[in-house]
Image: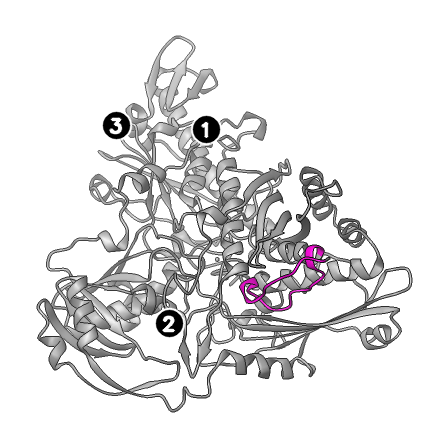
């Protein structure tokens, strides 16, 4: 899905700071657990190595990235959350490459919550996952961790065998001397831990990589996820663990007046029915009992403030706002005059609905208040925020909180909230039963869809014009939608009332567009907005790429050629667009009834172009047959993961483009489950071909950039088939007719 907990940044170090590693120190400790390596982050903080007693326990101390056990396991501590995007495999690959480890002996574990040790280097002093930042923020840091461990092992072997370090080789976890002496990592770990840590280490030349860039590094989490041993929040088992579901307000802005729990308490298995700030919690010995108890609660709500709240009214209000100047993201004094002189122009209003994340795993968290401490288990995507908010809700100091991060069944930004809503809710339930037992608060699909934290509803009003030669002369762009950052800890990123996540993709733009003006209105609503996979790019890319297609048509130019003319100063974008066009056969004939559409967009420092092939079903709905993806994401750490993220981004984006819409009437969400908040079916998934631009540049994002170009590319193909421009999503709203 941020800060980008889906997008911009909390505090971005300069490129020099992000890669300056000569100030980092590497600490180690020796014990029966083997060799532990910790890496100082480039924030001037000092790390403390784990003591021998702590390191000897089965629980790894929270200050190391690399641990090598006597039985030859390389354990890599991962500070990011695995939500299916391949982060754990990528981080482990970086370490194992420089360490020359045996990939079959590499495993990962999650880092505890500790922003001083495990902060996201792209964001600043915050630990969390989002904004496709894991590889681009850890590429050098994790390689140095592996290289330092390797250097210590080599020194240990040289000392033990009384030979020169230069005479040693390391391959798949084994150190070998030309005399024939050899030893495994585990055999040398204790001796290596006694040695002084080198201040500088040399990283491999990319030409020597054997794991980075190779499909040999298969995902580390696949087996556990397929054989059922992977531990999700719903799998947590603790002594006396109870389950709770929460009766939330039936409408946004509704307030609880009173409730009667008499019948609910009579349900077998129900132990408590308690009021919490979020609603009414029904606590039971099983999920089934909790659900039956929930259905038996009689609650009265004040919905007087909810009646006027509807998505259609928001669209109408936003359209009015879009006729008026807002806060300027950029403004040219010549925009209006140049548009007035344009030979041809387009004046269009685009509308985008609220979107839910609808991850396969609904929100959940286990909270346990015991011995003056709070302990939680969940897919913690923003550990620092969850730690702070959990401590505040529990009324305990930060040092009395322990977060146990577990893999998540999807996220797309939903688990990175300023309020840590699903964590705080679980803590509030645990408090309400006086900490009598650990409790798992589990949302149902329906409650997950009903309670906000959506991609905001947006309206764009655009007027753009061209001269007689087909060149753009002016572009007026007004955007209306809730700000994600205005009321959170990222409010400092706003300047002149501009939320960067609302305008990203429109401004700044890679296209050379003269006389461009971009305004923003950020109205408030009683509905919490949140990052959604690729954040603002989800709507801005659609507007930019369909409008450019429309201008190309007005100019009588080929859409690819037209874009390339505007990208003369952006060779990276042009190369990606050309690659997609070439691999798709752009300009070659297609079977009758099929048309192509194209879009190219940059997000999270990666550029993705997509060419789609689309036909119309007898129902008048579009069918996407083929998607050709070209991407420049820098050096690929795991090629298979890159391809998978592009493919997954296509499927995710196509679901939203075709079907997804959260509709609000009188403050109530009309959608309930996957029957009316449709996902793409497997037989609707198009063939996806991924082509990656070869690069030795540092890695950039891949988790989100595959999403933005898909919808506009499909819309542009629909125009070729029907002559209709789609101004409001999703496509399911329309019954298209092919041009005669």
1 or 2: tag closer to the N-terminus: 1
Q: Nearer the viewer, mark 1 or mark 3?
A: 1
Residue 405 position, x and y percent, is 31, 53
3 or 2: tag closer to the N-terminus: 3
Query: Callout 3: helix, strand or loop?
Result: loop
Q: Main secondary structure of the magenta part?
A: loop
454 vs 622, nearest the viewer: 622
Query: Callout 1: helix, strand or loop?
Result: loop
| Residue topped by disc 1 | 216
| Residue topped by disc 3 | 71
| Residue topped by disc 2 | 450
- The residue depicted at 39 percent of the width and 51 percent of the height is 81
Q: Which residue is farthest right?
A: 468
**Residue 394 horizontal side relative to residue 478, left or right:** left
Q: Residues within 10 Å of mark 2 (few under 14, many from 20)?
A: many
Q: Nearer the viewer, mark 1 or mark 2?
A: 2
Whole-number angstrom distance, CA of label 1 to CA of label 3: 23 Å
Whole-number angstrom distance, CA of label 3 to CA of label 2: 49 Å
- The residue depicted at 21 percent of the width and 53 percent of the height is 236
Q: Quadrant of residue 119?
A: bottom left
Residue 529 position, x and y percent, is 47, 71
Q: Quadrant of residue 286?
A: bottom left
Query: Callout 2: helix, strand or loop?
Result: helix
**Marks 3 and 2 close (CB-CB < 8 Å):** no
Which region is colored magenta?
720-739
**Residue 568 horizontal side relative to residue 329, left or right:** right
């Amino acid at each position: 899905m941020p800060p980008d907990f889906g997008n911009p940044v909390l505090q971005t170090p300069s490129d020099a700071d992000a890669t300056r590693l000569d100030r980092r120190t590497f600490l180690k400790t020796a014990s029966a657990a083997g060799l532990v390596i910790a890496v100082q982050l480039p924030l001037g903080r000092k790390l403390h190595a784990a003591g021998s007693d702590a390191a000897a326990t089965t629980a790894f101390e929270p200050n190391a990235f690399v641990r090598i056990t006597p039985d030859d396991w390389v354990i890599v501590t991962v500070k990011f959350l695995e939500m299916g995007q391949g982060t754990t495999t990528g981080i482990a690959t970086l370490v194992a490459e420089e360490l020359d480890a045996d990939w079959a002996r590499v495993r990962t574990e999650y880092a505890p919550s500790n922003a001083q040790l495990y902060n996201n280097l792209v964001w600043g002093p915050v630990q969390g996952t989002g904004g496709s930042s894991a590889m681009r923020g850890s590429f050098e840091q994790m390689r140095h961790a592996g290289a330092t461990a390797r250097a210590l092992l080599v020194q240990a072997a040289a000392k033990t065998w009384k030979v020169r370090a230069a005479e040693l080789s390391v391959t798949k976890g084994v150190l070998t001397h030309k005399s024939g002496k050899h030893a495994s990592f585990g055999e040398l770990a204790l001796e290596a831990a006694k040695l002084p840590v080198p201040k500088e280490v040399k990283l491999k030349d990319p030409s020597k990589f054997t794991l980075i860039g190779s499909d040999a590094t298969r995902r580390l989490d696949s087996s556990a996820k397929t054989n059922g041993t992977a531990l999700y929040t719903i799998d947590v088992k603790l002594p006396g663990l109870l389950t709770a579901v929460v009766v939330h307000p039936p409408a946004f802005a509704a307030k609880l007046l009173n409730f009667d729990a008499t019948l609910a308490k009579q349900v077998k298995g129900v132990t408590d029915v308690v009021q919490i700030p979020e609603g009414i919690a029904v606590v039971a010995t099983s999920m089934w009992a909790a659900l039956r108890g929930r259905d038996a609660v009689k609650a009265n709500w004040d919905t007087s403030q909810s009646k006027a709240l509807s998505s259609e009214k928001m669209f109408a209000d936003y359209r009015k706002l879009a006729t008026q100047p807002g806060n300027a993201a950029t403004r040219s004094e010549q925009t209006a005059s140049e548009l007035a002189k344009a030979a041809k122009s387009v004046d269009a209003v685009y509308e985008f609905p609220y979107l839910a994340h609808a991850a396969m795993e609904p929100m959940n968290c286990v909270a346990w208040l015991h011995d003056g401490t709070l302990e939680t288990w969940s897919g913690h995507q923003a550990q620092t925020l969850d730690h702070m908010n959990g401590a505040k809700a529990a009324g305990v100091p930060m040092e009395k909180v322990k977060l146990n991060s577990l893999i998540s069944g999807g996220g797309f930004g939903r688990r990175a909230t300023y309020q840590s809503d699903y964590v705080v809710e679980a803590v509030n339930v645990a408090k309400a039963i006086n900490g009598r037992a650990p409790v798992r608060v589990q949302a149902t699909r329906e409650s997950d869809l009903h309670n906000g934290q959506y991609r905001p509803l947006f309206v764009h009003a655009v007027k753009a014009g061209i001269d007689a030669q087909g060149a753009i002369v002016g572009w007026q762009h007004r955007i209306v939608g809730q700000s994600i950052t205005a009321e959170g800890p990222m409010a400092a990123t706003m300047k002149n009332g501009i939320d960067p996540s609302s305008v990203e993709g429109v401004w700044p733009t890679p296209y050379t567009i003269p006389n461009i003006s971009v305004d923003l209105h950020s109205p408030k609503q009683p509905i919490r907005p949140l990052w959604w996979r690729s954040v603002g790019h989800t709507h801005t890319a659609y507007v930019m790429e369909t409008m450019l297609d429309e201008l190309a048509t007005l100019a009588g130019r080929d859409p690819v050629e037209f874009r390339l003319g505007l990208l003369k100063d952006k060779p990276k974008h042009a190369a990606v667009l050309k690659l997609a066009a070439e691999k798709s056969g752009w300009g070659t004939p297609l079977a009758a009834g099929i048309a192509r559409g194209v879009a190219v967009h940059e997000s999270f420092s990666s550029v993705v172009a997509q060419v789609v092939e689309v036909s119309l079903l007898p129902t008048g709905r579009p069918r996407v047959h083929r998607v050709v993806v070209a991407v420049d994401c820098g050096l690929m750490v795991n090629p298979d993961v890159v391809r998978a993220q592009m493919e997954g981004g296509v499927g995710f984006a196509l679901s939203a483009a075709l079907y997804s819409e959260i509709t609000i009437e009188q403050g109530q969400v009309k959608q309930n489950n996957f029957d009316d908040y449709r996902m793409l079916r497997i037989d609707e998934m198009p063939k996806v071909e991924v082509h990656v631009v070869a690069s030795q540049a540092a890695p950039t994002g891949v988790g989100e950039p595959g999403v933005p170009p898909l919808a506009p590319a499909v819309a542009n193909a629909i125009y070729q088939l029907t002559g209709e421009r789609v101004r409001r999503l999703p496509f399911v709203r329309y019954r298209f007719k092919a041009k005669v």
